[in-house]
């Protein structure tokens, strides 16, 4: 029993839950991060979305099990290897799915709809879109975008248009980086990967390079425009602001532009990892394992919180 439970946890891919912290993105930039009730609602939404994403991973592994058994690495997954019986995995996926939808309905009707859209998108991706070039990348990116929308909808927050474009650009950048690394990996192990992911053969190296450059530039540029135009909400909280003591000459709200170099560095470092070390296949693993990139993210978060809540 303990062994089955452990295999079930492995199939749920808890490492992937780090992606769900993107639900805090809209709240972070809204100026309401420390506002009573807001943080708690989004944190609960993160927990629910983690359960939902795990149900999707279980479903995906069940559908892909026959092909995964032919894969040199994925054949070690619990379902593909037979360590986790399909009926148990399917039962757990169904329980997680309906539990999340029920609790999501209670939390927010629009959050519930976003969860449903996320599930439907990934079901279609697993069954159909992952075999179709461009649509496969758009589907992966769509999952990131829905996470950010879910976090905003659960507390009814407005999202700046440049913020949305940054999210879209970043999502596409990460999705293309994933395909870039997968193609490099398969090219290096052609015999072991024979017959695997035929869709990747439709992406030439030149095409992936163009896509990568396009979305890398779009990511930092749209963020720079967002940082330049972002206006902070006055929440009336107890945290003292620097603007209350600075002369009016220095009370411009463009301080967020100071974080742009950190974002540029993050994009450049991720590109380096994708091209030199072939690590883009799993963005969450890259973030947790690469100290320079992780440090950049932490510094960026600290700067954003300090500027919005300590200055603005």
Image (cartoon, grey):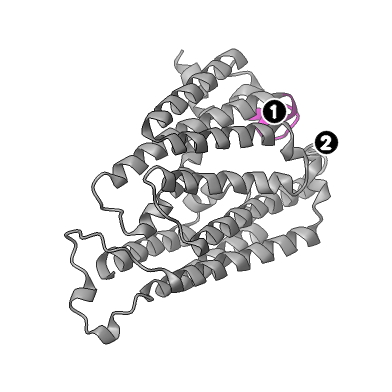
Q: At 43% across and 60% down in the image, what residue appears?
A: 297
Asked whether residue 169 is in view, the answer is yes
Residue 92 place in picture, x, y as percent? 51, 19
Q: Which residue is mark 2?
A: 195
First of labels 1, 2 by sequence position: 1
Residue 75 among magenta residues: yes
Q: What secondary structure is found at the residue carrying circle 1?
A: helix
Span highlighted in magenta in the image: 66-76
Q: At 42% across and 53% down in the image, what residue appears?
A: 25
Q: Is residue 109 above or below residue 168?
A: above
Q: Is residue 207 above or below residue 46?
A: below
Q: Nearer the viewer, residue 131 or 148?
A: 148
Q: At 48% across and 22% down in the image, what residue appears?
A: 98
133 horizontally vs 277: left or right = right
Q: Quadrant of the C terminus?
A: bottom left
Q: Nearer the viewer, residue 76 or 305?
A: 305
Q: Which residue is mark 1?
A: 64
- Report, in whole angstroms, how far the alpha carbon at label 1 lies from the one at label 2: 14 Å
175 horizontally vs 114: left or right = right
């Amino acid at each position: 029993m303990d062994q089955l439970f452990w295999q079930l946890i492995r199939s749920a891919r808890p490492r992937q839950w780090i992606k769900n912290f993107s639900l805090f993105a809209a709240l972070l930039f809204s100026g309401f991060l420390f506002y009573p009730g807001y943080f708690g609602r989004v944190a609960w939404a993160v927990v629910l979305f983690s359960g939902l994403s795990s149900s999707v991973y279980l479903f995906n592994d069940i559908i892909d099990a026959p092909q995964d058994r032919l894969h040199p690495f994925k054949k070690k997954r619990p379902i593909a290897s037979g360590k986790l019986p399909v009926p148990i995995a399917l039962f757990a996926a169904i329980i997680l799915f309906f539990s999340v939808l029920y609790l999501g309905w209670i939390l927010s009707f629009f959050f519930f709809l976003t969860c449903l859209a996320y599930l439907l998108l990934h079901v279609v991706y697993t069954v159909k879109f992952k075999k179709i070039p461009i649509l496969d990348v758009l589907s992966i990116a769509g999952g990131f975008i829905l996470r950010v929308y879910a976090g905003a909808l659960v507390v009814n927050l407005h999202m700046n248009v440049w913020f949305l474009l940054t999210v879209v650009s970043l999502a596409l950048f990460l999705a293309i980086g994933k395909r870039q690394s997968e193609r490099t990996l398969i090219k290096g192990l052609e015999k072991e990967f024979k017959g695997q992911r035929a869709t990747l053969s439709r992406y030439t190296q030149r095409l992936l390079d163009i896509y990568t450059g396009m979305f890398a530039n779009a990511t930092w540029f749209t963020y720079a425009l967002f940082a330049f135009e972002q206006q902070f909400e006055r929440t009336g909280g107890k945290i003292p602001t620097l603007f209350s003591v600075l002369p009016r000459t220095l009370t411009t709200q463009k301080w967020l532009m100071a974080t742009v170099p950190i974002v540029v560095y993050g994009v450049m470092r991720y590109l380096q990892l994708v091209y030199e070390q072939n690590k883009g296949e799993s963005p969450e693993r890259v973030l947790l394992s690469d100290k320079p990139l992780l440090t950049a993210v932490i510094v960026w978060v600290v700067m954003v919180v300090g500027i919005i809540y300590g200055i603005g």
